[in-house]
Amino acid sequence: FKRQTSPITVTLMFEALCPFCQRFISNHLGNLYDQFRGKIDIELVPWGNSRLLPNGQISCNHGQSECDANRLMSCA
């Protein structure tokens, strides 16, 4: 078998104001990236638990301020 040389994409769907997501990103994601540097690409998607409502608006688990923070993070 031929070894795959292109990096594997790891997608992390998270919520901007979720304390558990913040803790994981702060305490573990950097170590994971350092350990597998060159073997993984990390894609961050800041809309983890959001829902699209029938009226077209987005509802976030931690309120409107989280929706605003998710929107800002997705642009950054």
Image (spheres, rainbow, N blue to C red):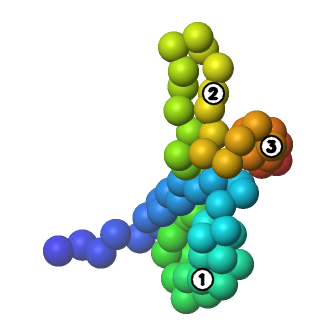
- Residues under numbered marks 2 and 3 in contact, where contact means CB atoms less than 8 Å apart: no
Q: Nearer the viewer, residue 64 or 36?
A: 64
| Number of the label disc, if any, that sits on residue 65 | 3
Q: CA distance from mark 3 to mark 1?
A: 25 Å
Compared with 2, 53 (above or below) is above
Q: How many marks?
A: 3
**Mark 2 is on which residue type?**
Ile
Residue located at (60% from left, 14% from top): 56
Q: Is residue 74 visible?
A: no
**Mark 3 is on which residue type?**
Ser
Which comes before the other along the chain, label 2 or label 1?
1
| Number of the label disc, if any, that sits on residue 17 | none
Q: Secondary structure at mark 2?
A: strand
Write down the residue under mark 2.
58
Write down the residue under mark 1.
28
Would you say 41 lies left or right of 25 here? left
Label 2: how many Cα within 10 Å (few below 14, some 14–19, many 20+): some
Mark toward the viewer: 3 or 1:
3
Q: CA distance from mark 2 to mark 3?
A: 12 Å
Q: Position of residue 17 (x, y in %)?
A: 72, 57
> Among all residues in the image, which is located at the extreme front?
63
**Mark 1 is on which residue type?**
His
